[in-house]
Image (cartoon, rainbow, N blue to C red):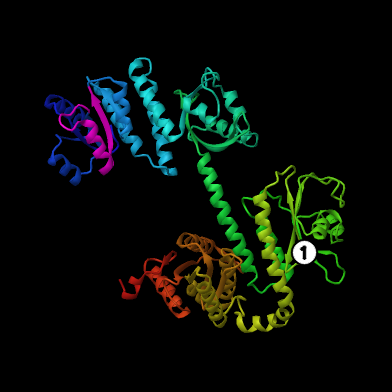
Amino acid sequence: MPLKKKNVLIVDHDPIFREFLLRIFEKDGFNAYWSIIDKEMWELLHHRKVDLVVLDVELPGEGGISVLQKLRKSHDMGIIMVSSQTSQTELIRCLKYGADDYINKPINKDELLLRANNLLYRIGQSKTDGAADRLNRQLISDYKQEIAKLREQHNWLRGQYESLINAQKIAKTGSWDWDITNDTLFWSDEIFRIFGLDAKTTKATFDLFISAVHPGDREHVKAVINKTLENESLDYQIKHRIVWPDGNVRYVLERGEVLRDSYGKPLRMIGTVLDVTARKKEEDREIREISSRITISALLETGLENLSLQRQLEIALDIILAIPWLRFINQGAIFITDKNSGDLKMVCNKNLPECLQQSCARIAFGHCLCGQAAATRQIVFSDKVDHQHTNLYDGMENHGHLCVPIISKNVLLGILNLYLPPFHKHDPEEEAFMSTVANTLAGLIERRHTEEELAKTQERLHHNAHNDALTKLPNRMYLSELLDLSIARARRDNTLMAVLFIDLDRFKLINDTLGHDIGDLLLVEASKRIKECLRESDVLARLGGDEFIAILSIISGKNEVGAVAQRIIDSLKSSFILDGNNCQIGSSIGIAFFPGDGKNQQELLKSADLAMYEVKKRGRNHFLFFDSKLYNGE
């Protein structure tokens, strides 16, 4: 029976047959209607949503095929063709012109309802993850309900099985049944296709399944299966890789349930396998694009921060090594060219052994891989430790390297040295992106060479004049400058930025009852927690009292900013232990976006302030995006 009441329209010239169909569908919970081919039928379709049409092929006049073509051009519903003939040619014509299914007269009631419900179920499927999950759960539920009826309903099961096969092909989902007691495994034909195996020549076994799981995922899959069998409250669910016989790696999502006896002993395990390879590849591609843009943006943003060249390159190295789609070992170093000595000088590294930090502190051009990259000004790739490695040490594990020259205006500024897993496959796309990263680093290094000396002189004066003495955060005056700068940058680059107006809930009570010293400690610790929730490129300022302003530049939208706001709220909920006092506060956050909620800093701050006070009215300890209705007091 359909999950929701569906509308079915019966179009047949035989009144007795129409009445027969009407009773079948109405008894099964459908809203059933009938019509002949005239103006009334088309008006009914125009004014009422019809989910399914049962259409007679042999309609008098223009005929069922002609009506089928018109319906397909103007309406979106499931269509089942009904005919008293069994011609293969007629079946093909119906499917060609858009029919979803075909059934011969005389009609079996159970077969008709099964086909109708399966058709409506398939139409309702979406390609989203949520739709796939619902299909998985429905398939598992259907499979559990039907397993007890298999022996008594052989003929009915055959038709149901064929419909299931069609649904699985459409959804790229296969079903399985593992008889744990007898150690036998059933796979539907779709699972064999998903696993790249021939259903006619291959016998499904548990060992075959485990051997098809990617070696890197195999132990984890076994552990999840065992845990599901041991714990009655758990359902089986896992996403993992499989390997086809030809070496092709695919991705699947498995779901299942364990059927137990009255003592809780596992008897059977049933479930589904969904091929998510296409989705995974698309996700990976999107992740690459997004993470690549974020990386370049993050690197560029470091150039806007008042940092030393060494610190800036340390941050840049952390950003590069954190790129999710690049399989780097979490090790690397950045060298800059020493203009005086003419060799490479290591300015920062990540997780290099002490002995290597010493031996590679300075590298001559042409020496080892980094020196070769410097001498040739070409990327040097190596997938293992070989004769090219001249800086060796006892206990060195096998690894690869990607050494990328950092060049600007035909001048070698340095080398980016990244560590790769052993036997890492050469990837032109990877090298091309790292060349872009190196060009970005070149701009940062060149700029810092020019600015660093001046920055050292200005830093101390600027900090004292523009930062809050208590929290060391930018003060109100400096916030004004930073906000103007962020707005100008967002306007210039046509990017989105956000302002978060953060007010500490219950701060005044603590300040009044425990004293100003505790209040000052609370402000300092709260500012640290807020800062930890932001990116390095974001700005946090103290507006005054217990109010803070956060500026988030180059953001994607509300979801990203809302996640940041929620992290701040969650962080500030935790207790503060200050000089032996357990202090509990919360936070109310109003959020405004440039340019939508304000064209200048005054408008942005006002919008964020209004949103924050609306949060206060609604009970505090939450965040709210500015809405123009707040201006009108709605």
Q: On the picture, is 226 further left or further right than 593? A: right
Can residue 15 be seen here? The reply is: yes
Amino acid identity at mark 1: Gly
Measuring from the top left, give residue 556's x and y in whole percent.
50, 62
The N terminus - image quarter? top left
Q: Which residue has dot 1 on it? A: 414
Can residue 51 be seen here? The reply is: no
The answer to which of 474 and 61 lies nearer the viewer is: 61
Q: Residues within 10 Å of mark 1 (few under 14, many from 20)?
A: many
Q: On the picture, is 384 further left or further right than 606? A: right
Residue ID at (69%, 82%):
458
Q: In which quarter of the image is residue 134?
A: top left
Residue ID at (51%, 41%):
278
Instruction: Please say if 63 is above or below 308.
Output: above
Q: Quadrant of residue 225?
A: top right
Task: Give the total number of marks visible in the rendering.
Answer: 1
Q: Which region shows up in magenta?
A: 57-83
The answer to which of 591 and 125 lies nearer the viewer is: 125
The answer to which of 435 and 266 lies nearer the viewer is: 435
Q: Is residue 519 magenta?
A: no
Residue ID at (44%, 65%):
621
Q: In which quarter of the image is residue 88?
A: top left
Measuring from the top left, give residue 323's x and y in whole percent.
63, 54
Measuring from the top left, give residue 138's x and y in whole percent.
38, 34
